[in-house]
Amino acid sequence: MARESGVTVRTLHHYDRLGLLIPASRTGGGHRCYTEADVLRLHRIVALRGFGFPLEEIGTLLDTQAGQDARGLSAEDFAALMKKRADAFAAMSPAERERLQAARARMIPPGVEIPGAEA
């Protein structure tokens, strides 16, 4: 799962320790087993990290919106998330912004447009 999602195994272990992404089960050898819901949660974590949210806040956001697709957010909730994203981006140093934009460019396939991704 790490390779397919663009994170390291160490990151998955870290998210497990923090309670952000707890595997559904483990094999007899101790390997983590993830469900489709876990994969979707990981994608949300990666996306929110890309927007500059700290892990603690991501946990709160995901737990508050458990099982809710981001497309189902109310206009007010979406606006609040976008404001937090803009505030986090504005607080970054120029070097941090450049790193974020480079990472975002690697994650978004060519030809796919993401609203607000220019910030």
Image: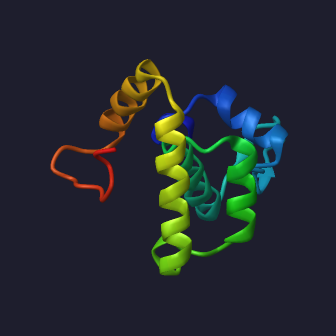
Q: Is residue 112 left or right of residue 75?
A: left
Q: Which of the colour schemes (rainbow, by chain, secondary structure, one colour) is used?
A: rainbow
Q: Nearer the viewer, residue 70 or 95?
A: 95
Q: Nearer the viewer, residue 10 or 57?
A: 57
Image position, residue 76 (x, y; %): 53, 77
When the figure is inspected, residue 41 is found, relative to residue 14, above or below; the finding is below
Q: In this figure, what is the number of numbered marks?
A: 0
Q: Nearer the viewer, residue 83 or 35?
A: 83
Give me the residue at 37% from left, 37% from top: 104
Rendered residue at 30%/35% (across/down): 105
What residue is rendered at 47% in x and 38% in y? 90
**Residue at 59% from the left image edge and 28% from the top image edge:** 8
State the image coordinates of residue 12 (x, y, percent, origin top left). 68, 37
Image height check: is 78 above or below 12? Answer: below
Q: Is residue 31 left or right of residue 84?
A: right
Q: Would residue 47 be seen by someone viewing this image from the given angle?
A: no
Task: Quarter of the image for the N terminus: give it.
Answer: top right
Looking at this view, name the residue that lies furthest to the left: 111
Q: Nearer the viewer, residue 87 or 47?
A: 87
Does 79 sit left or right of 13 as displayed? left
Q: Quadrant of residue 28?
A: top right
| Spot occupied by residue 21 in the image (x, y as percentages of width and height) | 73, 49
Can residue 86 be seen from the camera position used here? yes
Residue 119 locus on image (x, y percent): 34, 44
Q: Is residue 33 above or below residue 69?
A: above
